[in-house]
Image (spheres, helix red, strand yellow):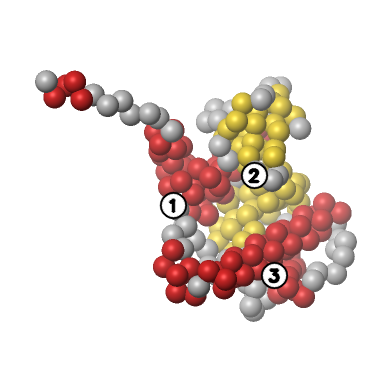
């Protein structure tokens, strides 16, 4: 697909869904999620050991299925303006939470599952949704996790910076992390200013770049 900037620049973005990897003009670029995960790895070892390998894989697979299916249902709803099918029982509560939020906030949707590429900082990703709320452009990330984790803010921050550049916005978009509870059907909304956190995301980019460098063995300097 072609990413077209408001200033006329174009970039050919290729996304490999199986590998969750991006190439721009044939060159691989890091995804936002992998950049953030490189700074904040998910340390699940102790938990996995406590519940056993079989149960660990079952819980992880169930969580991924719920998250992916809820995202797909919401994407279709935003794209077509209505529900395209009945949500399965496993995603009933996240969808119930989303619809409650929709009624309360009444966003004016502009994009769902939007692919982005930041030409200045060389990263790519997929934004869950973009909408205007009370006249302000908002970058929205849907989560079905147990809580809103701090690294999520950096993920949304990176998306917001890219959209600001691509669309030529004078003002940074707002960031919204919308957690859709799998147990209660309620939502938790976190609204924040992404511009206040972009310097931290840039440090994650620097760390990723450093981790890929080969450090020379200068043993000769010992004399």
The percent coordinates of residue 214 (x first, y second) are: 38, 29
Q: Residue furthest left?
A: 223
**How far across and how far down the image is residue 141, in percent?**
63, 55
> Could you tell me residue 40's position as x and y percent?
44, 52
Q: Is mark 3 on a helix, strand or loop?
A: helix
Q: Residue at x 70, y 38 (%)?
A: 15
Q: Earlier in the sequence, mark 2 or mark 1?
A: 2
In the picture, residue 45 is in which quadrant?
bottom left
Q: Which of 10 and 134 is in front in this view?
A: 10
Tell me the number on the disc at residue 40: 1
Name the image quarter holding the N terminus: top right
Closest to the camera, between mark 2 and mark 1, is 2
Q: Which residue was labeled with disc 2?
A: 20
Q: Quadrant of residue 159?
A: top right
Q: Does the residue at mark 2 contact the one at mark 1 (Cβ under 8 Å)?
A: no
Label 1: element kind? loop
Write down the residue under mark 3.
94
Q: Distance between the residues labelled 3 and 1?
A: 25 Å
């Amino acid at each position: 697909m072609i990413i077209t900037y408001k200033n006329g620049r174009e970039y050919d973005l290729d996304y490999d869904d199986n590998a969750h990897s991006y190439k721009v003009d044939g060159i691989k670029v890091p995804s936002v999620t992998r950049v953030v995960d490189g700074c904040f790895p998910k340390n699940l070892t102790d938990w996995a050991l406590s519940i056993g390998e079989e149960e660990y894989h079952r819980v992880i697979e169930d969580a991924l299925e719920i998250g992916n299916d809820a995202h797909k249902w919401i994407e279709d709803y935003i794209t077509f303006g209505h529900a395209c099918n009945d949500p399965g029982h496993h995603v009933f509560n996240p969808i119930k939470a989303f619809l409650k939020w929709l009624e309360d906030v009444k966003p004016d949707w502009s994009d769902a599952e939007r692919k982005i590429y930041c030409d200045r900082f060389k990263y790519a990703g997929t934004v869950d949704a973009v909408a205007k709320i009370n006249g302000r452009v908002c970058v929205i990330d849907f989560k079905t996790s147990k809580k809103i984790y701090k690294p999520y803010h950096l993920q949304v921050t990176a998306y917001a910076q890219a959209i600001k550049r691509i669309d030529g916005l004078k003002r940074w978009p707002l960031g919204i992390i919308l957690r859709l509870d799998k147990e209660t059907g309620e939502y938790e909304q976190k609204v924040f200013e992404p511009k206040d956190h972009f310097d931290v995301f840039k440090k994650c980019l620097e760390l990723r770049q450093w981790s890929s460098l080969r450090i020379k063995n200068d043993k000769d300097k010992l004399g």
